[in-house]
Image: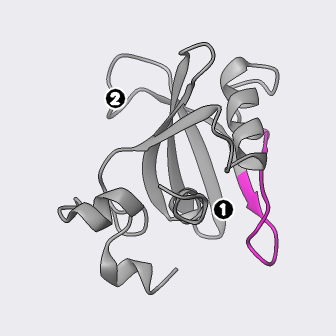
Amino acid sequence: MNTDDIHRYILGAYGTFTLTSKKTGKSFTYSRWDKGDFKAVSLLTGPDNNADYSYMGKLWSSADGKQLRLYSTRGSRIAEDAPSFKALAWFLQHLDSDMVEFRHEGHCCRCGHKLTTPESIDRGIGPYCATKI
């Protein structure tokens, strides 16, 4: 995925993605979902990759959509000084970094449908939804 595709995927309404440090090999898996205008992020914290997520915080996007930031909220279950929080916060500022590997789960980041064509899988979004974001 290129930087624009990663950016689009993270801003999509739904999606699960994993960041892996190429230096340490450490990985964290995050889930993104929208609740109205609220863009929430959760962290996989247990063995069930469908249900064991803990709320991290809110994703903020600048008006032009080019800047992304992660903020802790009152309901956050993951502290800002946790390695998983720091990793995502750093990555949002360095989407073009070759120090981190970005992988998504193979579902459209906008509607959640399973992706089947190679182009859609590579981008993380289906052709119809790509015209909407």
| Label 2 sits on residue | 49
Q: Quadrant of residue 82?
A: top right
Label 1 crowd (10 A; few <14 / some 14-19 / many >=20): few
Q: Check disc 1 and give the amino acid type.
A: Phe
Q: Quadrant of residue 74?
A: top right
Tell me which residue sits at (32%, 34%) in the image: 50
| Label 1 sits on residue | 38
Residue positioned most to the left = 116
Q: Is residue 10 above or below residue 98?
A: below
- The boundaries of the magenta stretch are 59-74
Tell me which residue sits at (50%, 60%) in the image: 9
Left or right placement of residue 25 versus residue 125 in this view: right
Image location of residue 22, percent across then percent down: 57, 23
* Of the pair 69 and 39, the residue shown nearer to us: 69
Image location of residue 38, percent across then percent down: 66, 62
The answer to whether one can see residue 33 in this image is yes
User: What label does residue 123 carry, if any?
Assistant: none
The answer to whether one can see residue 75 in this image is no
Left or right placement of residue 31 versus residue 107 in this view: right
Q: Secondary structure at mark 1?
A: strand
Q: Check disc 2 and give the amino acid type.
A: Asn
Q: Is residue 101 above or below residue 66?
A: above
Image location of residue 25, percent across then percent down: 53, 15
Magenta highlight on residue 61: yes
Q: Nearer the viewer, mark 1 or mark 2?
A: 2
The mark that comes first in sequence, 1 or 2, is 1
